[in-house]
């Protein structure tokens, strides 16, 4: 009477994709964790077995299928630095980059004149 519903084609596809990703990550992740110290390459946060799940393997050239065994395309990053790295890459792809796509430096200075204001006497004070 309680018959399990048969998985849909979408469910089977998602399951296969999850399995593929898990197998791929297990290979290069384990290799990278053996090659490199358990330290984030950006913020230098150190990891132990208790929090190792928060340390990710970042592919420097953003090609997740490029996994040389010498680790030359890998960098260990914490979750936060890894997200930041991918955000920078997405912005680069979206808005372009390179020598012809320069962005002007910010010119607004919110503290301009602060030193003078702090060292000046109020107008109603007499010297």
Image (cartoon, rainbow, N blue to C red):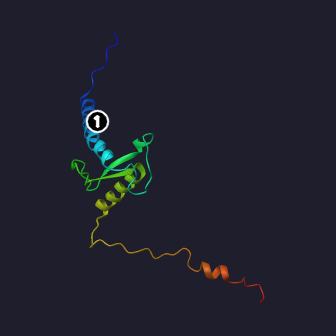
- Asked if residue 78 is positioned above or below residue 20 in the image, the reply reads below
Residue situated furthest top in the rendering = 1
The quadrant where residue 98 appears: bottom left
- Asked if residue 106 is positioned above or below residue 61 in the image, the reply reads below
- Asked if residue 16 is positioned above or below residue 34 in the image, the reply reads above
Residue found 27% across the figure and 25% down from its top: 7
For disc 1, the marked residue is 18
Task: Give how far across and how far down residue 108 sits, in percent.
Answer: 49, 75
Residue found 44% across the figure and 50% down from its top: 46
**Kind of element beneath mark 1:** helix
Task: Give how far across and how far down residue 83 sits, in percent.
Answer: 38, 52
- Asked if residue 40 is positioned above or below residue 99 in the image, the reply reads above
Task: Give how far across and how far down residue 19 sits, in percent.
Answer: 26, 34
Of 29 and 5, which appears nearest the observer?
29
Task: Give how far across and how far down residue 85 sits, in percent.
Answer: 36, 56
Residue found 34% across the figure and 60% down from its top: 91
The quadrant where residue 125 appears: bottom right
In this picture, residue 61 sits left or right of residue 46: left
Q: In which quarter of the image is the N terminus?
A: top left
């Amino acid at each position: 009477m309680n018959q399990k519903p048969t998985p849909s084609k979408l469910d089977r596809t998602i399951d296969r994709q999850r399995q593929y990703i898990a197998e791929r990550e297990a290979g290069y992740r384990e290799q990278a964790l053996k090659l490199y110290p358990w330290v984030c390459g950006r913020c230098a946060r150190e990891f132990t077995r208790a929090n190792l799940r928060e340390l990710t393997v970042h592919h420097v050239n953003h090609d997740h299928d490029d996994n040389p065994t010498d680790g030359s395309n890998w960098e260990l990053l914490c979750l936060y630095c890894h997200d930041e790295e991918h955000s920078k890459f997405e912005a680069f792809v979206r808005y372009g980059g390179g020598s012809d796509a320069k962005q002007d430096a910010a010119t607004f200075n919110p503290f301009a004149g602060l030193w003078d204001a702090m060292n000046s006497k109020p107008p109603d004070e007499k010297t």
